[in-house]
Image (cartoon, grey):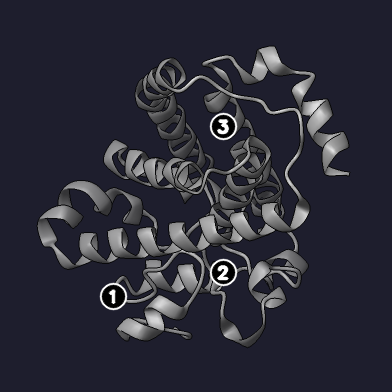
């Protein structure tokens, strides 16, 4: 199955080798993942059934805030991330092997990449909250909204966007991941980031699928935006448990 998928992807090699592809890929995947939650935001004021799943039922998403978030995302990608992807494309040409990776290796490397990113983000996030100058100049923008929604995922300054992008790009490189593994990790990472900020605790949410409270999810991160002294890890809960910064209820 993976070989069939990889053969299909390799059939679009000119697109994959383009310096435009990384930005197009990340933006299109991000916006596609945001769309279902934007639809829920439109329905929530009218439907009690939708509103019952909102983490902050009293809040609503205005078109002006959604537009502001979208514009900042586009600005950061086009002005800052795109030039860096061109530099990366020049220094590190894309190599497309003929064979797909074995499924167990792909799954294991995606998990390791996710765990590494979770630790890096936790450390980065904790430092930027503990050092007032860093928070004030770099991270405060992301906390503009105490009630999160999907498009607030990337409502951040350029320093934060670039830092997290470097973490996300470096981990597959350090592990020597296959390009298909790298793509799967990026898709999963974008989805989990959007879900973290979506503002809904849905029955099929990721944290409900992972046992023993090992994964925080949207409720975990929503509490961080309400109580900024807690829940610094983006996904898993073990680092917050170890550092005594875990909060499970408002």
How far across and how far down the image is residue 188, in percent?
Answer: 63, 51
Q: Answer whether residue 57 is visible to the viewer in this image.
A: no
Q: Give the residue at x 58% y 21%.
A: 21
Question: For residue 217, which numbered disc appears in the image?
Answer: 2
The residue singled out by tag 3 in the image is: 27
How far across and how far down the image is residue 32, in percent?
Answer: 68, 39
Gap between marks 2 and 1 measured at Cα: 17 Å
Gap between marks 1 and 3 measured at Cα: 30 Å
How far across and how far down the image is residue 224, in percent?
Answer: 39, 70
Q: Answer whether residue 24 is visible to the viewer in this image.
A: yes
Q: Secondary structure at mark 1?
A: loop
* 4 left or right of 70 in image: right
Which class describes the residues within 10 Å of circle 1: few (<14), some (14-19), or many (20+)? some
From this view, report whether residue 144 is shown above or below residue 78: below
Q: Secondary structure at mark 3?
A: helix
54, 80: nearer the viewer: 80
Q: Give the residue at x 54% y 60%.
A: 112
Check whether the beta carbons of the residues at disc 1 and disc 3 lie within 8 A of each other: no
């Amino acid at each position: 199955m993976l070989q069939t998928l990889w053969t299909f992807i390799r059939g679009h090699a000119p697109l994959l080798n383009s310096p435009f592809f990384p930005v197009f890929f990340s933006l299109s995947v991000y916006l596609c993942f945001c769309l279902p939650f934007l639809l829920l935001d439109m329905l929530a004021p009218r439907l009690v059934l939708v509103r019952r799943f909102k983490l902050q039922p009293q809040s609503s998403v205005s078109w002006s805030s959604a537009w502001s978030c979208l514009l900042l995302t586009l600005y950061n990608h086009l002005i800052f991330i795109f030039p860096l992807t061109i530099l990366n494309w020049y220094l590190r040409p894309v190599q497309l092997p003929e064979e797909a990776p074995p499924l167990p290796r792909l799954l294991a490397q995606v998990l390791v990449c996710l765990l590494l990113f979770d630790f890096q983000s936790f450390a980065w996030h904790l430092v930027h909250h503990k050092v007032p100058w860093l928070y004030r100049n770099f991270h405060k923008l992301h906390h503009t909204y105490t009630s999160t929604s999907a498009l607030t995922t990337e409502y951040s300054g350029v320093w934060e966007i670039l830092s997290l992008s470097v973490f996300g790009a470096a981990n597959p490189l350090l592990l020597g991941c296959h390009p298909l593994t790298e793509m799967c990790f990026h898709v999963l990472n974008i989805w989990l980031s959007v879900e973290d900020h979506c503002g809904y605790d849905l029955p099929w949410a990721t944290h409900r699928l992972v046992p023993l409270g090992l994964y925080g999810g949207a409720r975990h991160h929503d509490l961080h935006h309400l109580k900024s002294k807690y829940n610094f890890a983006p996904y898993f809960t073990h680092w917050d448990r170890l550092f005594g910064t875990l909060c499970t209820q408002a």
